[in-house]
Image (tube, rainbow, N blue to C red):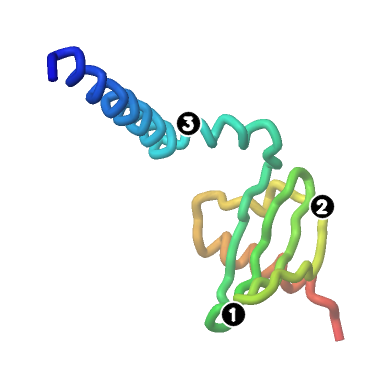
Amino acid sequence: MGLGDIFNMLFPLLLITILLGVVWYFVSKKKFIHNFSKYNSLPIDIVSVKSIMPKKYIAAVRIEDKLLILGISDSSINLLQEKEFDSSYLNSGNDDKMRSKFHEILKNSWPSR
């Protein structure tokens, strides 16, 4: 068993180790996966989420120029209302103001009895 035989045995192992290291680097940094998502991504922003019961939420979600009011539970997501998006719905830095704005959006979009 000469030096050439040892090299022939260790070279594939070294090559596989380097290949796995490169794959791990790209997956951990999500550079490879992230490049694919930019081609078919929609501009989706979560404006606000309010918990109404355990595992039940109401969310205001902006998709392009629409504001969707969604009812979210652990087993389903339901569209409650769809509205045109107004930039005044966004958080202006004051959390109390945003909370009251969410309640105003919810009250305006809830069907009256």
**Amino acid type shown at disc 3:** Lys
Relative height, residue 103 to residue 9 (above, below): below
Q: Nearer the viewer, residue 33 or 64?
A: 33
Q: Nearer the viewer, residue 38 or 16?
A: 16
Q: Does residue 96 appear to the left or right of 73 in the view shown?
A: left
Q: Is residue 43 left or right of residue 19?
A: right
> Where does label 3 land, which residue?
31
The residue to which callout 2 is attached is 84
Residue at left offset 59%, top offset 80%: 52
Q: Is residue 33 above or below residue 96?
A: above
Which element is circle 3 on? helix
Alpha-carbon distance for marks 2 and 1?
Answer: 24 Å
Of label 1 and label 3, which has the lower sequence position? 3
First of labels 2, 3 by sequence position: 3
Q: Quadrant of residue 49?
A: bottom right
Regarding mark 2 in the picture, which secondary structure is present there? Answer: strand
Q: Amino acid at mark 1?
A: Ile
